[in-house]
Amino acid sequence: MAGYLIKDTTREERQRIVEESLGNIDANCDGCMSGLAEMYQDYIDGKKEIREITMEFNARYVKADLPKDEL
């Protein structure tokens, strides 16, 4: 596999990347974050890169009222 970008991977490779990264893909263990695997479904389907999904997730935690130099 050449990389992690959609253009460099097949759907099966992207599925394996997500499964290996998350460890317990079923999220049925104590303390697992349910829905985490579903968060990366757009990557697996070839709709969004991992970077885009991560940035969208992190954006929820950026405080909107801080000046940019304080972020």
Image (cartoon, grey):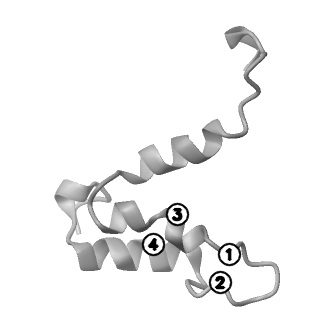
Q: Is residue 70 left or right of residue 38?
A: right
- The residue that appears at 73% across and 39% down in the rendered structure is 61
- Of circles 1 and 4, which is in front? 1
Q: Position of residue 71 (x, y in %)?
A: 72, 21
Q: Position of residue 26 (x, y in %)?
A: 58, 88
Cα–Cα gap, marks 1 and 3: 10 Å
Task: Say the numbered circle drawn on residue 27.
Answer: 2
Q: Are marks 2 and 4 in contact (CB under 8 Å)?
A: no
Cα–Cα gap, marks 1 and 4: 14 Å
Q: Sequence-wise, which precedes: disc 3 or disc 4?
A: 4
- Of circles 3 and 4, which is in front? 3
Q: Which residue is mark 3?
A: 39
Q: Sequence-wise, which precedes: disc 2 or disc 4?
A: 4
Cα–Cα gap, marks 3 and 2: 12 Å
Q: Is residue 62 above or below residue 3?
A: above
- Badge 1 marks a residue whose secondary structure is loop
Q: Which residue is mark 4?
A: 18
Report the amino acid beneath label 4: Val
Q: Position of residue 50 (x, y in %)?
A: 42, 53
Q: Is residue 71 above or below residue 25?
A: above
- Badge 3 marks a residue whose secondary structure is helix
Q: Are marks 1 and 3 in contact (CB under 8 Å)?
A: no
Question: Seen from this angle, which residue lies furthest right?
Answer: 30
Cα–Cα gap, marks 2 and 4: 13 Å
